[in-house]
Image (tube, rainbow, N blue to C red):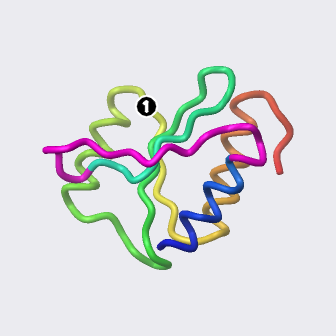
Amino acid sequence: ERDVEKFLVQEIKKIGGKAFKFVSPGTLGVPDRLICLQGGIACFVELKRPGGKPRPVQRFILLYLYHQGQRVAVVDNKDTAKALVRRLCKQKGGDAL
């Protein structure tokens, strides 16, 4: 999980964004990172080891955020990290990587 997280943070930095470590004391299941890009693009990201799946409380929080209109993603390897970066680039009107 740590390698995937490091890779995602680097890829977001390459496109001029930030991938903040997200913590919410007293709230279980919050996503690991909050990605912020120019143009008001934001996405909550849950990071997992390759093949890993969110725990039920994490799924609940991701679905809650999604139904509130937020972008959410689960990233478990470098390919899903790259796909997320490409999607976010398209949404902000930039070139896909």
Please state the extent of the stretch shown in magenta in the rendering.
13-29
Q: Main secondary structure of the magenta part?
A: loop
In the rendered view, would you say 10 is above or below 25?
below
Q: Which residue is mark 1?
A: 70
Judged from the image, the secondary structure of the residue bearing numbered disc 1 is: loop
* Residue 64 location (% of width, % of height): 27, 37
Residue 32 on the magenta span: no
The residue at the point 54 percent across, 41 percent down is: 35
Of 78 and 53, nearer the camera is: 78
Of 65 and 42, nearer the camera is: 42
* Residue 49 location (% of width, % of height): 45, 76
Residue 17 on the magenta span: yes
How many numbered discs?
1
Circle 1 packing at 10 Å, graded few (<14), some (14-19), many (20+), is some
The residue at the point 31 percent across, 43 percent down is: 63
* Residue 20 location (% of width, % of height): 50, 43
Q: Residue furthest right?
A: 95
The residue at the point 86 percent across, 39 percent down is: 95
The residue at the point 41 percent across, 27 percent down is: 69
